Amino acid sequence: MRRLLIDITHTASQDYHTGIQRVVRSLARESLAYSANPESKVECLPVVNLNGQFVHVDRWCAARGYRKSRTDWTTFCQNLVPDMLGTSSRLALNKLGTRIRKLLYPRTIDRAARNMLRKMRPKPVAVNPGPGDVILMPDSWWDLPEMFDTIHDARLNGALVGAMVHDLIPIRYPEFFDEGLRNTFTNWAERLVHSIDFFLGDAQAAEDDLWLFAQEQNAALDKSHVGHVRLGCDIRPINPITYSRVPANVRKLFSDRAKAPYLMVSTIEIRKNHHYLLDAFELLWNEGQDVSLALVGRVGWKCDDLIERIANHPEAGKRLHLLNNINDDALNYIYQKSKAFLFSSKAEGFGLPIVEAQHHGLHVFASDIPIFREVAGSGANFFSLDNPSDLQQQIVDFENDRGWESEPNITVKNEPWKAVFPKLVNTVNQLASNVQDSRLANASQAA
């Protein structure tokens, strides 16, 4: 492998705040750091697709942290909403702010302004992938079908192309998504598996599912063309908190560890299974357990009934809290002060909040699905999604033992991206070699 080209087209052009975009930005950053090391034998660099060809990422994009813009509109709007407002009022104001922005600054004006700025910059520098180059596609580009033409041309020119696919959840669990996204993703994945040379997952469970999918689609891939690299976790050291940036209501809620809420951090959407947590805690409350639950995360999709259930719950604002306006200092504070961490998701590609919780010294209670067994390790507590009473009993035992006063048993080591990226380079290099070996073997048999 001469060069490893990491495509970041979607992340560089869309300001979504997803886990995949966090991964892509980390890969872009580490690729340059890796290449700067004089001992590195492979040049690694981020690229974007522009007008049907891969080009170098310009310095403006890098300066923005490989984002579309510096401004995080959602966070900006949420920070304008007073903390004293209730959940339903805050959600209504957030929706109103988004609508106002779209009316005053629609996408057509946004595109025109960006095209004008692009024309003022120096001409993009083409990468011209060819023999010895490997293109890795780790981004969420299923709504960019024009990318297939670009990678097809690169393969015709001698480059190898691999896709880092983080999960196949829209295919395996279609009930969690709207029909439009479900169809878009499925069509993309079915075309992708016949358009690349290898697959890369971010965990063993992901690798197994990708290989199964390749077989289901009768793709021209061998088992040796599918691998995985465990994601890096660049979680900052637990630094002193700027308490002025932690809202007073949050400080009060988490002031006493023994009375602090149990915590779940995730987007509020149907796949995360918040209803299960509410069912379990209602069982606890009905039997007289004085425990509370805090749900931290932005509101997503297909969750109107959940939001209504939370907003109208008898324990809302008492022992049930929805915190969707949390800055980094406040989240760091919450992680440090919570009683324990809960993650009830039905399906995940990785589950980074589990790693974050363990980093902050929290005991983890997670749904018993394969990826969580892999990510959290044997030291975590796992509950069945078939019956909320399973989690209920585990929390009763944890309360009786005052489990939050003991150190959690963390059995899985999570490494920073700086340590993970060289492993990714080696894995990609091995997968590329396997592809070349297969081609040579097939050519020999044909001869």
Image (cartoon, grey):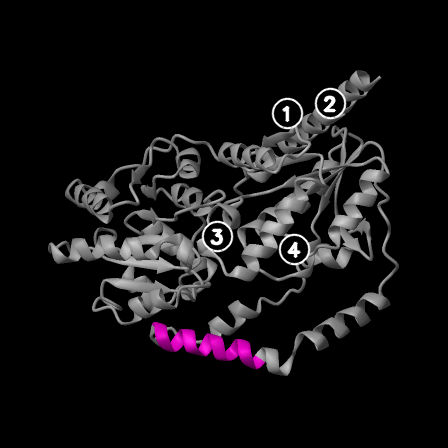
Q: Quadrant of residue 34?
A: top right
Residue 173 % position (x, y) = 46, 49
Q: Amino acid at mark 2?
A: Ser
Separation of disc 2 and disc 1 at Cα? 9 Å
Q: Amino acid at mark 4?
A: Thr
Check contact, mark 4 vs mark 1: CB within 8 A.
no
Separation of disc 4 and disc 2 at Cα? 33 Å
Residue at the spot of label 4: 11
Residue at the spot of label 3: 174
| Badge 4 or badge 1: first in the primary sequence | 4
* Secondary structure, magenta segment, majority class: helix
- Using the image, tell me which numbered label, if any, was put on residue 438: 2
| Badge 3 or badge 4: first in the primary sequence | 4
- Using the image, tell me which numbered label, if any, was put on residue 10: none
Local crowd at mark 3 within 10 Å, few (<14), some, or many (≥20)?
Answer: some
Local crowd at mark 4 within 10 Å, few (<14), some, or many (≥20)?
Answer: many
Instruction: Work out whether residue 299 can be spotted.
Output: yes
Considering the numbered disc 2 on the image, is that residue within a helix, a strand or a loop?
helix
Check contact, mark 3 vs mark 4: CB within 8 A.
no
Check contact, mark 2 vs mark 1: CB within 8 A.
yes
Judging depth in this view, the residue of 58 and 375 nearest the camera is 375
Residue at the spot of label 1: 224
Looking at the image, residue 44 lies above or below residue 247: above
Q: Residue at x 46, y 63 (%)?
A: 301
Q: How many marks?
A: 4
Q: Nearer the viewer, mark 3 or mark 4?
A: 3
Q: Amino acid at mark 3?
A: Pro
Residue 26 % position (x, y) = 62, 46
